[in-house]
Amino acid sequence: MCGIVGYIGHAQAAPIILEGLKRLEYRGYDSAGIALIKGSGFSVTKQTGRVDGLSQSIPPDFGGGTTGIGHTRWATHGGVTDDNAHPHISSDDKIALIHNGVIENYAAIKRFLITKGYEFKSETDTEVLANLIAYHFAKEPAATDDSSRLLNSVRKTLHHVEGTYGICVLCADHPDEMIAARRGSPLILGVGQDEMVVASDVAALVSRTQNVVYLNDGELVAIKGASFTISTLDATGVSPVIDQVDWTVEDTDLGEYDHFMLKEIFEQPAALENAMRGRFAQDGATAMFGGLNLTANEIRGIERVMFCSCGTALHAGMVTEHLIERFARLPVECDHASEFRYRNTPLFAKTLFFVVSQSGETIDTLAAMREAQRKGFKVLAINNGVGSTIAREADGGIYQHAGPEIGVASTKAFTSQLVLGAMLALYLGRIRDMSFREGTEIVTALKQAPDLVRETLKLAPQIEQIAKRYAHVEDMLFLGRLELFPIALEGALKLKEISYIHAEAYPAAEMKHGPIALINEQCPSVFIVPANELFNKVVSSMQEIKARGGPIIAITTAGAELPDGLADEVVRIPQSHEVVLPILATIPLQLFSYYVAVERGCDVDKPRNLAKSVTVE
Ligand code: G6P
């Protein structure tokens, strides 16, 4: 939700900020803006639309400043207008500020500031921050050490603020300073060669440096020239830990592909290999995870497993639920993270608690994790965001190592979560209730998964043709059973997200309890119907659709004998073990939604109204 970039250094700030914003557009893309320090004031350009549009609008006399801030917006408070775009400038023109998050008590602060003569030009919650900092800055006693004047003003402001923020602040009177702070929204400091970059995500700063400091909630960084200090809101100093980012800017480039989504779909074999690398025990026929921070004895004592996550990551948890129940004989519950935190679920002491999140920044998932921790549970994270807030606050976890995922619709992160979920089920199973032989079979099957995905990806041309035939429809059903029901949910979600076709998913047999009323020649159904113990049952469900004139697309396995003429389209994925099948069945659904969206002329990587990382509640 919104991307922010700040630069202070020796180079021209504008191109660096604009390039950073381009890389953060997945976080929001309804408007964008930039402000540079220029003389004793600011040069500001901001407008609705994308970062490319902003780049073209910057006037030649914008200024060659070496200090600046930029923002790409996903609107929360206030419509998508030029005035509501960030940066916001205080009404005395002293402070420029960008913000990611929501200021919940903005109305009260605004009323107060109006009584003090401050004027507002936007409908945003953010503008109160700029004006409140300006208010405190004006009030700071003249005797205050000049170098702390801005920092103190920001601190005083943040003490009054309820809600979430990642902010970056410039002051016209202190042109060599920048203050950034976070609570609930991600913020990373890149420490370069005589330059500093502050951003919502490492993607925006790896072109300048791979040395980063992940700020914690409640921390502020004060940058002056080429040096920085970190402190808390109550002015306690914090020793910075400088981490190294293990990927480069090339990993976030499109390469030969038209869209990041397609690139990331084709990166899935490598993502699976990276997730599994070094995580199988030679002689134990099991998986091993270095970061769980639990002994085998503690795992043996577990009586339940709980997963909380959002969107696609929730679907990964739902597939894992089936596999853990099947292999480890443990009851598993999956919940929407956004619901869990308010649901007052009875929780049992011996519960192993997981959150799943690609970004590691989703606020609902983070809040669910904190709620479980508050209740005394250790929470483990399956997470792709190295250094993300969830990764740092979790009590242990499993990194996905899927590499940066840029397309808003999650693809490689999902299948990487699936393979890790299967490995988790194997690991729990082997400690509890699974033979060496069955463990060996699963290890063998999982190791084959990347090659089977490569094989499945060869279906792309066939799926592209099918997608062209169905791209005009407005409603679709996705149907599967057991661990393939969450895959149907994922297929429907992908289609909704990027092609704006209304799609619903059901367990296949549940379809006759309502959704079948939707069926006609205009409403196709996608059935996931592998050759397994429920094959005939799913075929019966297909017959019921066929009898009512509904077109059918069947995702089935090689060799499965579907009745002639039952399906209008038949896509055959390789036959495989049940731990791998959900991964393979996902691939045609991803490709289908991708090609449908392309055919409909949709903006695949930046679908309307969505953001990749939802950092507001
Ligand atoms: C947003 C994205 C989804 C994603 C969900 C959870 O809604 O649009 O694609 O699945 O957030 O994100 P996370 O980073 O926590 O996996």
Image (cartoon, rainbow, N blue to C red):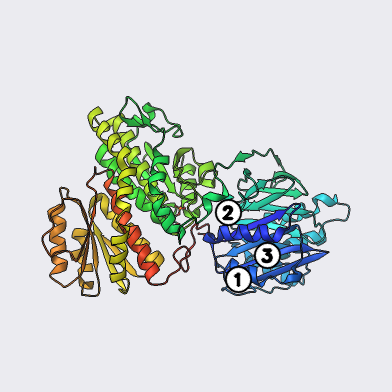
Q: In screen coordinates, is 194 left or right of 449?
A: right
Q: In screen coordinates, is 581 left or right of 219?
A: left
What residue is shown with label 3? 34
Rendered location of residue 203, percent (x, y): 57, 52
What is the quadrant of the N terminus in the image? bottom right
Q: Is mark 2 within 8 Å of ligand 1?
A: no
Rendered location of residue 100, percent (x, y): 60, 59
- Tell me the residue at 47%/69% (across/down): 608
- Tell me the residue at 31%/29% (across/down): 431
Q: Earlier in the sequence, mark 3 or mark 1?
A: 3
Rendered location of residue 107, percent (x, y): 63, 68
Question: Splitting the image into four quadrants, where does ligand 1 fall?
Answer: bottom left
Give me the disc on residue 53: 1
Q: Earlier in the sequence, mark 3 or mark 2?
A: 3
Mark 3 burial class by Cα count in 10 Å: few <14, some 14-19, many 20+ = many
Whether residue 338 is visible to the viewer of this picture, yes or no, is: no
